[in-house]
Image (spheres, grey):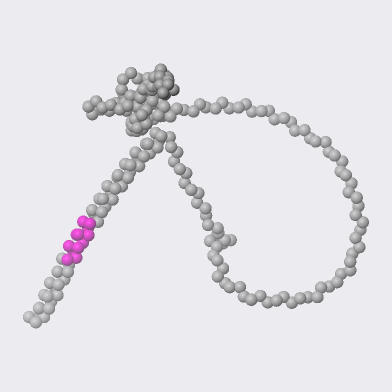
């Protein structure tokens, strides 16, 4: 009994050591996979946020999304599957045996009769179809950029993006104006020098950019000609 107990105890200790190592590796692998999943989830959330911002900017600028390219199906054979190239090599063709041609007596041709002209038929007059009245064309609706610029021009003091969105929503309820889209439109106007942005505390206000007066433009043109 003491002789057999020694190998059994040694084998059990080896199993215990191997299982312990496998558990440690399993735990480390779980931690690595969990970290990768968290990083991918953060990346997915960032991409979804950027996607929403880009859609709002696309709607504000009036850019149409590109249409997907048409998919051309592969040609199919008579059985419905794709045609496969014929891998059989053509064998050598045997020369066809020539048969002696039988001689036929030449048939006598009858004299051709002159063609008789057909009587002209009177042209049938088709009844005139009544002309359909032209449908009136609907006037094109102004873009969001024009509505925002027009609203700021009518105001005597700066307005925030929320105030502009609220006013346009009351005037045009069918357009479903959103504050995020209006803010993006205002920032685009500021970037193109079409509006000015001012900050009062934590709030941002916008005013339309003033155009140069006609007299100032004429003086500038006169100064250029005198020089």
Figure quadrant of the C terminus:
top left
> Is residue 215 toward the left or the right of residue 39 in the image?
right
> Is residue 132 toward the left or the right of residue 29 in the image?
right
The answer to which quarter of the image holds residue 22 is bottom left
- Name the residue rendered at 37%, 31% in the picture: 192
- Name the residue rendered at 38%, 22% in the picture: 211
Is residue 24 rendered magenta in the image?
yes
Is residue 61 rendered magenta in the image?
no
Q: Which residues are magenta?
A: 21-32
Looking at the image, is 96 positioned above or below residue 24? below
Q: Do we see residue 33 in this rendering?
A: yes
Along the viewing direction, whichever of 188 and 86 lies nearer the viewer: 188
Q: Residue furthest front?
A: 227
Question: Could you say where residue 108 lies in the image, as x and y percent from the top left?
Answer: 91, 63
Looking at the image, is 148 positioned above or below residue 34? above
- Name the residue rendered at 42%, 21% in the picture: 226
> Is residue 4 toward the left or the right of residue 33 in the image?
left
Figure quadrant of the N terminus:
bottom left
Question: Could you say where residue 30 lies in the image, as x and y percent from the top left?
Answer: 22, 58
Along the viewing direction, whichever of 4 and 137 lies nearer the viewer: 137
């Amino acid at each position: 009994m003491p002789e057999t107990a020694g190998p059994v105890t040694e084998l059990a200790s080896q199993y215990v050591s191997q299982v312990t190592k496998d558990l440690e590796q399993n735990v480390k692998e779980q931690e690595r996979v969990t970290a990768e999943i968290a990083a991918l989830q953060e990346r997915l959330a960032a991409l979804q946020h950027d996607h929403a911002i880009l859609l709002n900017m696309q709607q504000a600028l009036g850019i149409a999304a590109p249409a997907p390219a048409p998919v051309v199906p592969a040609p199919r054979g008579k059985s419905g599957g794709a045609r496969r190239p014929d891998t059989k090599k053509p064998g050598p063709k045997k020369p066809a045996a020539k048969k002696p041609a039988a001689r036929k007596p030449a048939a006598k041709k009858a004299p051709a009769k002159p063609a008789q002209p057909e009587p002209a038929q009177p042209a049938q007059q088709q009844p005139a179809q009544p002309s359909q009245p032209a449908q009136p064309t609907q006037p094109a609706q102004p873009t969001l950029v024009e509505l925002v610029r027009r609203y700021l021009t009518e105001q005597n003091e700066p307005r925030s993006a929320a105030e502009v969105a609220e006013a346009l929503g009351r005037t045009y309820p069918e357009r479903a104006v959103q504050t995020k889209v209006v803010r993006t439109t205002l920032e685009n106007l500021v970037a193109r020098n079409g509006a000015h942005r001012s900050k009062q505390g934590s709030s941002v206000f916008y005013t339309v950019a003033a155009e140069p007066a006609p007299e100032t433009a004429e003086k500038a043109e006169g100064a250029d000609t005198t020089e």
